[in-house]
Image: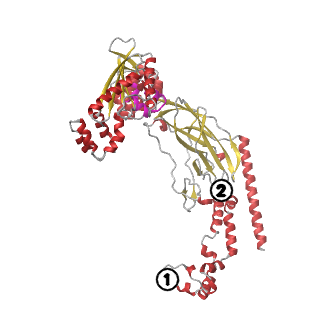
Amino acid sequence: MKKYTLYSALSAAAAIAVSCSAIVRMDVKELQKHSTLPTIALPADERMYTEAYGKSINRDVDITDTSAIIGPEGRKGYLVRAFRDSSGTLHMSEPLNEVVITARFKNIPERNGTVRLAFEVNVPSSMLNRKWQVRLEPHAVLFDDTLNLEAVHITGDQYRERQIRGYELYNRFLASIITDSSLLIHAGRLEIFINRHIPQIAALKNDTAYIDPDSIRGQYGITRSQAKEHFMKRLVIRYNDRKKRQIEDKFRQFVKDPYTTENIRLDTIMNNYECKFVYLYKENLKTRPKLRKIDICLSGGIYFQGERLYDIPISAPLTFYVSSFSSMTEDITRYVRAVIERKVELTTSAAINFKAGKADIDTSYMDNHAELQYIQSIISDLLSSGEYLADSLIITASCSPEGSFGFNSKLARKRAASIAGFLDDNDFQLIERHIPENWERLYGLLRADCLIDDLSGIIQLCGESSPDRREYLLSTHPEYSYIKEQLYPILREVEFQFCLHRKNMVKDTIHTTEIDTIYSAGVQAIKDRDYGKAVRLLGSYRDINSALAFLAMDYNASAMNILEELPVSGKRDYLLAVVHSRNGNEKKAVEYFLSAVNQERSLRFRGNLDPEISRLIDKYKIQSENL
């Protein structure tokens, strides 16, 4: 009898499901027959665009109650806007707005590299059904790139109930899986066995001292673990393990239409199917260089039990024309004065090494070959450049303080002469100089070396007037070996000072102008809508372009400070009107706007593009014939 009743119930449920599916498909065919489609339109609330800069009506959805459903691996169901009625039943919904604007385009301002889009998604009541879900996917088209915006889901209450029921069945299955290992043991039998055959462990039952139970063996050498293993509910364990392996399959069996949790703006439950659904969609998008318009399209589908029954084709686009302060940039070329000297000096050094006490150049010794090639390459580049003529090359050789001052003086002079002889093939005068012991350079190296511990003590020793006595005292210091190995070799470097003059230049100095590349880069940054960079580059120039950069970043006080210093012009007065409008001084804003239009008639049409001005045009009924 029970089997028959269960079979009858299952058959009845299956028949109801088949009947429900057939009804839904018939309703979908009616939609296809009448080509019923959702639409997108501009919102009736113009304040979305014409309020004070940076402000708008906040109609974002708030979550007043939530419901989470646990899925496989602990994943949760999606949270939606919700409220409870007097019976405690949970409903999810979105308020309706019956009024829309039928225009297909809108001018919107770009500020700080961002535009605010607002459009209404309208779904006719004939597309709303308790048994299905409408999924709408807005797309933004920028140039040839399409951005998928977050989807809007309109869910029938019976559709959601089916989803919730599926999760309930799945959660009931999860709850049937035993997670407490103590329930998988015949605990009573195990305790009797331990009391009878391992009494030592039974005696420790209430003992708080830790003792490893497996270190105690009862009759026949049986441990507690072995006894526990013997009394496991093996059949129950096998059944429980099979359930664990079925988790994913059971999720698919019970939850035929899982909650969509990614890239969703709204998932709302309808409770009124006689009125159309209207949702105000707001999106902030980063603009791109040269972006003039953004097209918004809508597509989607109707779903029943996870199956897509109806394709919603891509709608006609809603176009937003982007106005930007970058279009008001003035292509100004600035110049900077540059002073050019006739005489030019170039100084470099080379680590030319000599053997101890020797002055002859050995090109095979250490890095001498590479260092001499480096000097020759500089000479070659200077002579072949065509811009300079070489007057002289001053060669200065020096020695480190080892040895007597007299010997080092002769050695340094000989080394300078040796290098000059090596370079004597070049067509310019060679001047030989020498420094016997370059103590000044050593002092600089000591002060710059962070590894020197006793700097003050070493400098004090170097205060000795006699160079030889100075070297002797320094050699007694504990840090002398480091100084000798690391710093002395630098003192032996040879310095080369090239004295040049520019060809065909008679005066010692001339003044010329060059294009100010910093200013040019700042202007380009405005055009590329990188306003932060533009402010950094143009902030000190205090002209119309720097004022534009400050305005684009909403630095209104800085912009006004610059604009008030500039000569009167149409563009200057228009930007002052924008600043005063942002600051709430409408009287001043209107005055400056009227002044701007009287100077440049085209700014009247520009005013419709900037919300700071278009708001004033509408509020004070500023018509073309009044200007």
Q: Quadrant of residue 625?
A: top left
Q: Is residue 624 left or right of residue 397?
A: right
Q: Residue at x 48, y 26 (%)?
A: 327
Image position, residue 396 (x, y; %)? 33, 26
Quarter placement of the C terminus? top left
Q: Nearer the viewer, residue 131 or 304?
A: 304
Q: Which residue is mark 2?
A: 158
Image position, residue 449 (x, y; %)? 33, 41
Mark 2 burial class by Cα count in 10 Å: few <14, some 14-19, many 20+? some
Image position, residue 205 (x, y; %)? 53, 83
Q: Amino acid at mark 1?
A: Asp
- Please report whichever mark, 1 or 2, sits nearer to the chain's N-terminal start: 2
Q: Are marks 1 and 2 in contact (CB under 8 Å)?
A: no
Q: What span is colored magenta in the figure?
A: 522-547
Q: Secondary structure at mark 2?
A: helix
- Would residue 390 be seen by someone viewing this image from the given angle? no
Q: Amino acid at mark 2?
A: Gln
Foreground tag (1 vs 2): 1
For residue 295, above or below residue 137: above
Q: Which residue is mark 1?
A: 207
Q: Is residue 133 left or right of residue 205?
A: right
**Which label sits on residue 35?**
none
Determine the main secondary structure of the stretch shown in magenta: helix
Q: Nearer the viewer, residue 503 or 279?
A: 503
